[in-house]
Image (cartoon, grey):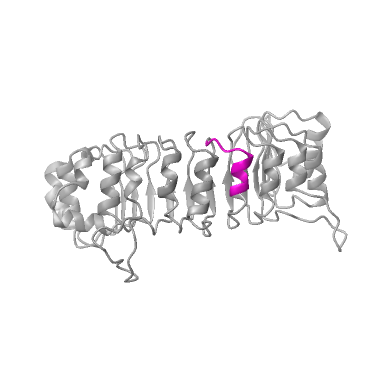
Amino acid sequence: EPEDAGVLRRAVGSVVTLDLERNGEVADSDFLRELLRGAGGGALRRLNLAGTAVSVRLFEGEDALVLAALGGLRMINLDSCPSVSDAMVAGLVRVSPWLEEVCLEDTPLSGLGLRGVGRNEGEEVTRWSGVKAGAWTKMRRLCLNFTRVDDDCAEHIAKMSMLEVLELDVPGITDTALAEIVDGSRGLKNLYRLDLSNAKISDDGLAEVSKLTALEELEICSGLVTDAGVKHLEPLRNLRVLNLANNRITEESMKQLFPLKIGAENSAEVLHPHLRTLNLSFTQISGTHLVNALREGAACALSYLSVTGCELSTSVRRVLLEEVGQLAGPRSSDDYVGPEKKVLVFGVEVGDE
């Protein structure tokens, strides 16, 4: 309750993580200010406000204790906060420059609030290294899924060269933005997860993705990728998760992903030895090369395969089931689980156990 704020303020002085997800009282900026004043000693590192109606006023004003609490943050979650605006994010960039993890998923952000990224107003000095750095340039995880950002935000994201996870599941992002982010950030050498599910990424965009050789998880479901684009995935030898659902790819793409070249030891060359999860739903594959890849060991690591909506012959389906192994029993009429928890999906997509 709001009247408890003073008691709570005294109790949170050494709190490192403050989780207020879906807490209705957060709409009362005075309540939250009291909590943050209690954390003004600088111990607070993680703040979860997901699903709340946090006010932009939180990032305004001159309350030294509140600014100290926000200034020490390394993570903030504003997922599904309807009051998030460009003005609020601009304030967050200003008062919380050392953030390493930010989630702004499903908010009305247009990207204008990111204009302060990289600035070093006041010549602040980072607390852990003693070197000067611009705001948000230590960012490791950034989620902008289901926001209103577009290509204009690329120049700001490009300043976050230490990113490990970047989630841009938004239709306003195109190949142009992707090229600017990759080139402007000097290659995002630490990036291991890239979600561009509904971004307007085509074969040209995959050419940019090919430079991100540390990638382990990639999702592109724009419907604009063809077999020519899949060729660009060859350098990504660390892939574990690949989602190409809804794209215009055929068996030629399967040959690119799982070549059946014979090596010196008379065995198939495994181009993507770590690829465990593959989503090919609603593509144009026939499954014939995939069957051969499984038989020859070129797809030896696969434990989850989705071919929902693909026009596979009865014989291909039967062989795929055989390659999954002795069935441990169906979870649905279109979904089967093998003894090693391998999952093959013909109908409704489900997750692994």
Q: Which is nearer the eye, 319 or 94?
A: 94
Instruction: Identify which residue is drawn at 53% across, 35% down.
Output: 198
Q: Is residue 156 visible to us here?
A: yes
Residue 342 image point, x, y percent: 68, 45
- The x, y position of residue 324, in whole percent, is 75, 44
Residue 96 on the magenta segment: no
How many numbered callouts?
A: 0
Residue shown at 58% from the left, 54% from the top: 212
The residue positioned 28% from the left and 45% from the top of the image is: 90
Question: For the C terminus, which image quadrant?
Answer: top right
Can you give x and y, in whole percent of width and height, for residue 1 in the image?
Answer: 16, 41
Between 131 and 334, the one lying in front of the other is 131
Q: Residue furthest bottom?
A: 130
In the image, is residue 326 above or below residue 309? below
Q: Is residue 116 left or right of residue 254?
A: left
Residue 206 belongs to the span the image colors magenta: yes
Q: For the point 20% across and 58% down, which residue is it?
A: 68
User: What secondary structure predominates along the stretch shown in magenta?
Assistant: helix
Q: Is residue 291 above or below residue 67?
A: above
Tell me where the magenta segment starts and ends, as one range: 199-208
**Residue 12 visible in this rendered orientation of the protein:** no
The answer to which quarter of the image holds residue 112 is top left
Side (left or right) of 94 relative to 144: left
Nearer to the camera, 330 or 181:
181
Asked whether, in this view, residue 77 is left or right of residue 183, the answer is left
